Amino acid sequence: MTAATVATKVPAPGLIARQPILDAHRNVVAYELYDRSTVNKVYNVESDIFLTFSAMNHLGDEMLQGPLLIFINRTHQSLSGGHLDLVRPDRVVLDIGPVPGHLKDDIDALAMTLRELRERGFRLAFKHSVLAAVYAPWQPLADYVKVDLGTVKPEQYTAIAAAVKGRTQASLIAEKVETLEQFVAMKACGASLFQGYWVANPEVITTKVVAPEHAHVLQLMNLVRNQASTEAIETALKKDALLGFNLMRLINSCGFGLTREVTSFRDAVMLMGLNRLMRWAALLLITSRANTTHSVFGTTAVVRGRMMELLAAETLSVEERDSAFLTGLFSLLDKMLGIPMQQALELLSLPHAITDAVLSGTGMFGNMLSLVRACEDNDDEACAELAIALNYNNHQINMAHMEALVWADNLVNSA
């Protein structure tokens, strides 16, 4: 995917609807996500990628807990997109609609793509139209068949359920269950999963689409494409607070599948790998927009992070230097996202030392952040008190502040 192919067509903020899918005992076993931000319900590759990206970065922690699955609707054009390499296939069900006009050649052509997706570990869900003879190549690939009760009559339930059992190995999902009678009837026919207003109402969530600076995303892509060093890529991530936020949010989400918390850009880059990093950066182009507010606060955040990192380098370990940088970098996250800081930090998985510093100014990093703020405000009295508490002298503080300003200015000019 290139910059030329990712036109920004999705309005912000994004609206994501999620509807529970329940078993026969009314236990939630999955959620289906719907993109509610499109115009006139026109879905395409861009909207599909937006839905996947939003789900991973904003809903992943809540929805990818335990055994829950995520059903995501896909257009046929997005089934071969590299963005699917970023998600855990064992937790995602691709909900695929019928071919327009039910053309046999198109059905046959898509069968190979669907087979490859299933071999990669994705589960596939189809509408009950897949039971038609023309869809025979798809039938062995079905993990779920969804029967739309809004389009079939009660007297058809038994025949459709028998066809699902006879032509596929799929579980039967009763979709658009509006009444108790429908639930009972479909359960008697062998449906094991249920979805609809009678079962559970969908919930619409406004997601914050995080938009890093366009130029920084493109530079990151160039570095990755040229197989730059980990240090060079780490430096690029430090240019843009929201670029770093996106990466830390993704790699620590349940959807990424790591078993340990990642708290530095260096580790994130190494664990993610260049191929997935390139695909992730390409996705960010979709949500990149010119944002003056972000530019102002983002530059200040970068200066804060770098100054804290330089001060930490005097006496602290490499891990503590990373934490100091992240504390400064994310200290204005509420301003950049336009949401309360508590809510902004909940989107990340950060050590308590960082969150406590940002939220309440406590601990060593909290004092360092207060010192940086005092320098910004030219508050000599507060600066002197904090310098004594942290055991820094005026020369160390002044040099760190000056070097941070120069460093941030060079980053902006080289973007």
Image (cartoon, rainbow, N blue to C red):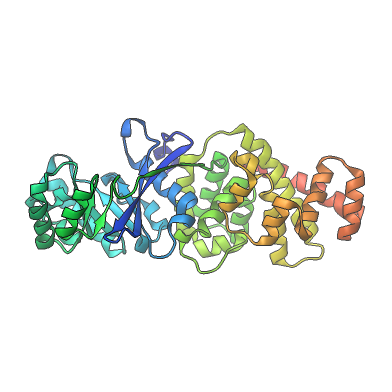
User: Depth check: 384 or 299 in front?
Assistant: 384
Residue 287 percent coordinates (x, y): 48, 40
User: Depth check: 21 or 242 in front?
Assistant: 21
User: Depth check: 137 or 59 in front?
Assistant: 59
Question: Residue at 77% of width from left, 51% of height from top?
Answer: 369
Relative to 207, 52 lies left or right: left
Within the image, what quadrant is residue 337 found in?
top right
Within the image, what quadrant is residue 164 found in?
bottom left
Within the image, what quadrant is residue 92 found in?
bottom left
Residue 270 percent coordinates (x, y): 55, 64
Question: Residue at 34% of width from left, 60% of height from top?
Answer: 27
Instruction: Look at the image and tell me in which quarter the C terminus lies.
Output: top right
Residue 153 visible to the viewer: yes
The residue lying furthest to the front in this view is 180
Residue 68 percent coordinates (x, y): 38, 61
Q: How many marks?
A: 0
Asked if 321 appears above or below 55 in the picture, the reply is below
Residue 266 percent coordinates (x, y): 61, 61
Question: Residue at 37% of width from left, 41% of height from top?
Answer: 35
The residue lying furthest to the top in this view is 40
